[in-house]
Image (cartoon, rainbow, N blue to C red):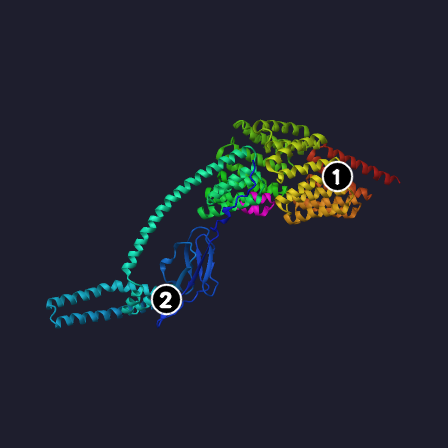
Amino acid sequence: MRYFALLLFSLLLVTTSFAQTQQGFVKTKGRMVNGKLVPGQGLKGAIVSVRGRTTVLVKADDGSFSFPTPDNQFRLDSVKKKGYQLVDMDACPKTYKTSKNPLFIVMETPDQQLQDQLSAERKIRRNLQKQLQEHEDEIEALKEQQRITDEEYRQALQKLYQDQENNEQLISDMAKRYADLDYDQLDEFYRQVSYCIENGELVKADSLLNTRGNLSEQVENILQRGQVIQQEKEQLQKAEAVQQADIDEAAQRCYSYYETFAAQHLNDTAAYHLELRASLDTTNVDWQIEAGDFAREYIADYDKAFEYYQVGLRQSLFLHGENHEKTATCYAAIGDVSVDFSEYEKAFAYYDKALNIRKNIYGESHPEVASSYNSVGRAYIYFNRANADLALDYFEKALAIRKACFGENHSDVATSYNNIGFAYQALHDYNRALEYYNKALSIQLLLSKDDAEISNYYLNIGSVYRDLEEYDKSLEYLSEVLKINLSIYGEKHPNVASCYSQIGIIYDELGDFDKALEFYFKALKINKSVFGEGHPRVASLYGNIGVLYYESHDYLKAIEYYQKALDHMKSSFGEDNLNVATYYDNIGSIFIKLSDFDKAYEYKMKALEIRTILFGENNPDVALSFNNIGWVFYNKGEYDEALVYYKKALNIWESTIGEKHANIAQCYYNIGEVYCKSCNYLKALESYKKALAIRNEIFGTEHQKVITTKEKIAEVQAKLAQQENK
């Protein structure tokens, strides 16, 4: 069963932004002069301090500024401008909610603020004095009209004067209000009302307010609407509860369907149901991550995985903020996709964000921090195996944390030993690699008979023996891995396919073409059924089959399979990807065998261009391309050009991976071949001896490459002797 209908991503319609920006202004007060607004002036040069952020310098003439607020709030610590003070002294320090409305920070010189305070107080006192006189006149008139007794008259005057004394606090409060008032922030109606009140034109203020209708009726209407809204809220809450229950049930059905189809390796259909669940609630970060993980691992849709991880990141930042484990998980997942795309600088940046968040949350010594150290370390090796020394530092930090947290005998400690073995294998230190892989295996065997983990460690040990060209031992371990994987997963599983592929490589190295092809096609059949035709794992197998045909001199078949591999890799990763460069290289090598050197040069140059774009000039992979182009010119008989490219490769390798490396030995050997063809036997002998010294140290004296190099040296020495005898 397979679904071909694409689910429309409602998750792409999410509009919440995790990169909000708060706008603001630092300015003087707006004032009313003769009933007209005189706007305040922007204060360029003010300094705004926001907690946890770099201080903001106000550069605009109108006093505007802005700063990012990933959370829903921010804390304003201070605002400073030489010669000015805050009008509202409670404005800082203070926590504010992020808003689309600008934040107005009003400042005045101390002299101006004092003058405004005194001016406001003078107006208020003048108005109160006028009211006092009016009330005194009213009391006097009542007495003259004999409408009140002498005693009532005295009591009325005493109360009037007592009220006047009690108004002192009112005068102070009102004076401060009007001294602090920024008329810029009022609309025109309330600007006029406030101006009238400030200037004692109370009848006019009352008249203006009455133009808005009966206040009691307005309040009553507001209260009635509030009751209706409350009822609607209660109904909405009930509807939301029903909706949430439906979402939960549908999500569970989606997940059950996903598990059913995943167990049958019907990955497109399984992915469809995870995507359905993710669309039910785009705010559920875990669902977005799970949909992204499956899209990345099982259907190789890296663009889709990236989209899900980005939605998860946006939601996590919105819901939880930057400093949260789910945010770190999203950053790490985006780092994983970046590695898939060979975008290693991006991967490092995202892994580093995840690492820093986890350090902030947990401190230095926490298992999640160790996990981030491992991600960074593996990215270094994927980027460039010459960085394995750097990767070792991160792996050892992770190991130290895990041993401190769990002790020696823990599965996470075994994983760290395995990673360290991976680094030593990249460094061609195969004895140390075996040591750490075996440590990992010993812990796993002690802990439990988790056959899946045990098979992984067997696989790694087998790969070291393959690198050492001890193919019988490698085959022994891989056969054990295959037996375990078949017992766990059955015949139609990617892990079984991977094992078939590794065994095929060994038979290829042993020169057993038929056996190698048999295992490659077994792996290909499984991977095509599980992942579909366009998956990178399928492409890799096409590439391996291409190698077989190349080695058996069936160059047309080799081109056919290399081209399939190239097309799939370009479809998955785009043009600028290391895997794509590898297949351009391989096709170029076939054209060398076909003596079509122009085509060979064209494909080798394509590989060089991609590697230079990805890594820059001074990189071991770029050196590999220079070496390969040198091989084109060598086969073409243009030995001077070949020497130029071989020396370029040698210089880069020596500066990046050190002097004792198999690639450098091969490069010296290639240079020796060029000098030999040019009859420069002294130079050839010098280069062969350098190659031999390195190969002796890496492989030991009995290795075939060591024997071949010794034979070359003997051959050159014989030719030198012939020259001397002539």
Q: Is residue 434 visible?
A: no
In this rendered view, identify the residue nearer to me: 309 or 417: 309
Q: Are discs 1 and 2 less than 8 Å apart at CB?
A: no
- Residue 263 image offset from top left, x and y in percent: 54, 32
Residue 646 position (above or below residue 168): above
In this rendered view, identify the residue nearer to me: 5 or 640: 5
- Residue 300 image offset from top left, x and y in percent: 59, 41
Magenta region, residue range: 336-352
Inspect the image, locate mark 1, and give the three-letter code of the amino acid beneath it: Tyr
Q: Which residue is mark 2?
A: 188
Inspect the image, locate mark 2, and give the three-letter code of the amino acid beneath it: Glu
- Disc 1, SS: helix
Q: Which residue is mark 1?
A: 555
Which sits earlier in the primary sequence, circle 1 or circle 2?
A: 2
Residue 107 position (above or below residue 327): below
- 344 drawn magenta: yes
